[in-house]
Amino acid sequence: MKRRHLVLALTGASGVIYGLRLAEELLRADIELTMLISRAGFMVLEEETGLQWQGSADETLARLKEYFRTDDGRLRFHAGDNLSASIASGSAAPDAMVVCPCSMGTLARIACGISATLLERTADVMIKEKRPLLLVPRETPLSEIHLENMLKLSRMGVTMVPAMPGFYGHPETMADLVNFVVGKALDQLNMDHHLYKRWKAQV
């Protein structure tokens, strides 16, 4: 049986830990994962985690494989200017795409159909091919522009999974808060997990 192929993009919004944690779960689920990182995403990655992954595509891929401890060929990486990558074509569209975290700039460019980078082009492909596209926006406060762009994309079928941790599971650590958001993204991808406690009504 063919493995599901997902694309995970990290952009310049704060909260890169959400994307790293999501990548761990996706790789654990035995899927093919293609990762994209925007220029601002590399900057935030270093600022928030100390990870210096920017370099050639081969260098970045080697660092990804080392970090996630995988070398079985399921993890791929493409540079942002590689518009000849297969995922830039509707005939080779991945099964789903997640942008986590998603900056408001990236969200706006996707909403306007701008395809200047591979990340933006792949998101455009997902929309036109009606494939699942999930955005995990992380910004506060939200301006009218942000809200209008999210509404526009939502009406196109794009799923918004804002980085808003829940507290009904009584989180005890930062990891619990991260896992809640990652779990919500996995829910939208129809993937099983045990990252947070489901709500159970008291009857």
Image (cartoon, rainbow, N blue to C red):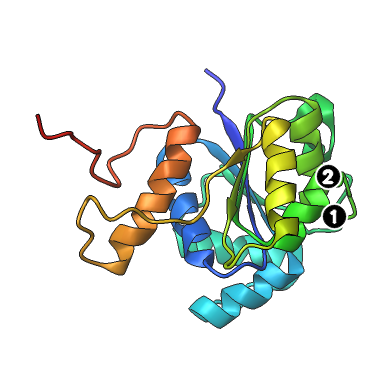
Q: In the rendered view, tell whether residue 12 sits above or below residue 77.
A: below
Picture quadrant of residue 141: bottom right
Q: CA distance from mark 1 to mark 2?
A: 6 Å
Q: Is residue 30 visible?
A: no
Q: Position of residue 62 (x, y in %)?
A: 61, 63
Which is nearer the eye, 91 or 130? 130
- Residue 163, numbered circle: none
Q: Residues within 10 Å of mark 2 (few under 14, many from 20)?
A: many
- What residue lies at 49% left-to-right and 56% top-to-bottom? 163
- What residue lies at 57% left-to-right and 67% top-to-bottom? 140
Number of labels in the image equals 2
Image marks 1 and 2: residues in contact by CB distance under 8 Å = yes
Q: Is residue 159 visible?
A: yes
| Residue 126 located left or right of residue 14 | right
- What residue lies at 75% left-to-right and 69% top-to-bottom? 39
Label 2 residue SS:
helix
Q: Position of residue 146 (x, y in %)?
A: 70, 57
On the image, numbered disc 1 is attached to which residue?
117
The quadrant of the image that shows the C terminus is top left
Label 1 residue SS:
loop
Give amino acid for label 2.
Arg
Give amino acid for label 1.
Thr
Q: Position of residue 156 (x, y in %)?
A: 73, 31
Q: In the rendered view, tell whether residue 9 sits above or below residue 93.
A: below
| Residue 22 located left or right of residue 84 | left
- What residue lies at 80% left-to-right and 46% top-to-bottom? 111
Q: Position of residue 12 (x, y in %)?
A: 67, 68
On the image, numbered disc 2 is attached to which residue?
121
| Residue 101 located left or right of residue 201 | right
Which is nearer the eye, 174 or 64? 174
